[in-house]
Amino acid sequence: MTQVVAALIWQNNRFLICRRPPHKTRGLLWEFVGGKVETGETKQQALMRECMEELAVKVRVDDVYMQLVHEYPDMTVELTLFNAAIVEGEPQLLEHSEIRYISVDEIDRFDFCPADVEILKKLKADFGVSAN
């Protein structure tokens, strides 16, 4: 089981999503910024490191929004999505092919990684957006 962390970062009622580069596994799918927890790190430390590595931003990690287990053909992940906020810097394209902020009612316009599907359903339910 691979421990993975991700950030739910809001700005003006829109949340940050990142598009995986074409050459990576699950290339061109959208996801939340984040990555694998390394040995000796807490989940919060891992998320702060990943946000710096991938977007060149410092984040404040808040409470857990959702936690789930997802089985991909090549790995099983335990994904912890934290509420987080950028406290320094502007997101930059260091690892992803594209980044943007979207509203909850725009979710269905994007192809997300399969592990994020349950999270997206919860976001829609929390914000009263009908599920498609």
Image (cartoon, helix red, strand yellow):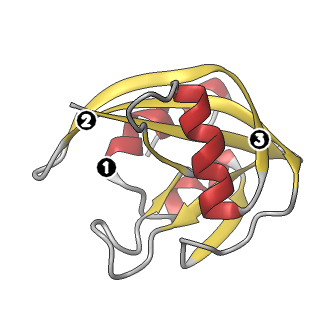
Any part of residue 130 in sight:
no
Q: Marks 3 and 1: which is nearer the front?
A: 3
88 relative to 68 in the view: left or right: right
Q: Which mark is residue 114?
A: 1
Residue 14 or residue 34, whichever sits in front? 34
Residue beneath disc 3: 59
- Are there few (<14), some (14-19), or many (20+) residues within 10 Å of tag 3? many
Under mark 2, the amino acid is His
Specify whether residue 116 is in view: yes
Image coordinates of residue 29 in percent, x first then y, are 40, 66
Dot 1: what SS? helix
Tell which circle, 3 or 2, labels the residue nearer the N-terminal end. Answer: 3
* Residue that sits furthest to the left in the current view: 73
**Is 55 in front, or is 70?**
55
Q: Residue at x 77, y 55 (%)?
A: 57
Q: Amino acid at mark 3?
A: Val
The CA span between labels 3 and 2 is 25 Å
- Mark 2 surroundings within 10 Å by alpha-carbon count, few (fewer than 14), some (14 through 19), many (20 or more): some
Side of 88 where 39 appears, left or right: left
Secondary structure type for disc 3? strand
Pointer 3 or 1: first along the chain: 3
Residue located at (57% from left, 52% from top): 33
Cα distance between the residues tagged 1 and 2: 8 Å
CA–CA distance between discs 3 and 1?
A: 25 Å
- For discs 3 and 2, the disc positioned in front in the rendered view: 3
Relative image position of residue 126 (x, y in whole percent): 63, 25
Q: Are marks 1 and 2 in contact (CB under 8 Å)?
A: yes
